Image: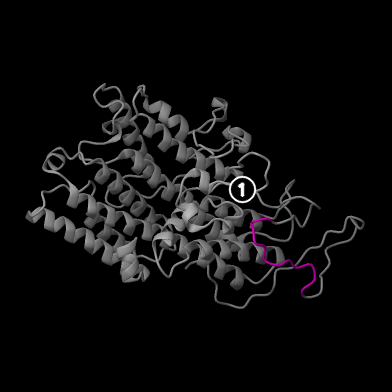
Amino acid sequence: MQIVKFVRLPLFPIVVLAAAACDRGPVEPQPGQNEIQVPTAYAFESRFQAGASSVDYSGQIVRNLLVQDLKVAIDRLGKPGARPITSQQLRSLYEYNDALNLSTLTESGSAPAKEARYSAIATGKSVKNAPVAADAVIGYGKTVDQLMGEWFEIIASNSQDSKKLGTVAVYTTAEGVNLAQMVEKVLHGAVAYQRGTGNYLAKVLEQPNTAAEAGKPYTKMEHYWDEAFGYFGAARDLARYSDAQLAGSVAQFAFDSNSDGKIDFQSEYNFAFAKSAGKRDNGGTGVDFTKEVFDAFLKGRTLIVNQGTTQQLAAQATIVSQTWEKVIAATVVHYINDVLKDMAKSTPEQVSGRNNAALNNHWGEMKGYAIGLQFNPAKQISTARLERLHGLLGNAPPYAATGTAAYTKAVADLNAAKAILKEAYGFSEANMAAW
């Protein structure tokens, strides 16, 4: 992995700010002095402002909400009573501007949201300006931004058709591609995963850690680590959640931890990847992705505060990046299994009309997450394997009558895709079947 440096480097110098001695320079404490222990929750006090938190990833929360809200807005078009939408209305979430002063569409569960307006959480943030990964998507030859524009146009056009509006057809292509799933899952990979791993974790070792950023209670290195955590999308007390809760309803994966009667999206809510980790743990055996990622985030942030060695921090960044990747890969396996089951249940009418809603839905999740795997520059799976994987998954759900040669080939292709993921990530045979 690119961020690992296998050379012994000196400790980062520790700066102690003395309020009563502002004219004195930094002092070097004795080994172990002023160090903190690894906490059980993602909470770290500032080294520079007494009593202030040094944790801030509000911009990542806004982008997580905007991506999630795009899915909500598109899903609503398939409900009875839906009204037509324009591509510009979809773009208003993708290219969000604070002047719109919009509130999130995301439900907060058993308690109201502490802050519902995006601009009350962070300003100047949009999905597109994250920025979205600029690489051409494997199998499409277009960037994510180009694909989003095309998909928004298809959905908007379909919404003008009264026969499609209010049904799943409004966001489903003629080939059976569920664009609601594709929009959300591709953006999870091209924004949160890409920025979290390819930018913040990959570059955290390059950031200064001896003084606070101007007007802020944290160093740039602390902030980079926090921003990666924000994109992973876990509640700050993730360890309190069971795998079943993370795999459950919003009332289970959002919790009013401070008992103020509200849900804070910045600390008391679990977004996509945190939930996916819990789901794979819940459905698998011998894996604990949730604990691996969260423990590494906590240890890494503690190392930054304590000014540990670069090797120590790089090791924790590697654990986060590689486990995050495994969560996505395991999720692709899960949806391949669902697609295989859906294919076996498809009726002749569904096959001829390419309208098995469950198959289209699960294929969209499978393909969308699989696309995301390419956006980690330190990915464990090779580009050649990814190209082979996408060739097997195809660009539309497989429709063929059971018993035909086409059906047999489609099943073989999906099983071959699973084999690629099993070999690349070392997943057990039991989990390949159970997920």
Identify which residue, 394 or 262, lies in the foreground.
262
Look at 61% across and 48% down and name the residue there: 267
Q: Which residues are magenta?
A: 32-43
Is 173 situated above or below 344?
above
**Main secondary structure along the magenta-highlighted residues:** loop
Count of picture labels: 1
Residue at 64% from the left image edge and 75% from the top image edge:
9
Classify mark 1: residues with Cα within 10 Å, few (<14), some (14-19) or many (20+).
many
Residue 365, x across and y down, in percent: 33, 48
In the rendering, at what x and y percent does residue 309 appear? 65, 72
Where, by quadrant of the figure, is residue 155 drawn?
A: top left
Q: Quick check: 320 left or right of 405?
A: right
Residue 141 seen in render: no
Residue 301, placed above or below residue 154: below
- Looking at the rendered structure, the kind of residue marked 1 is Ser
Q: Which residue is mark 1?
A: 267
Q: Secondary structure at mark 1?
A: loop
Which x, y percent locates residue 285?
Answer: 40, 68
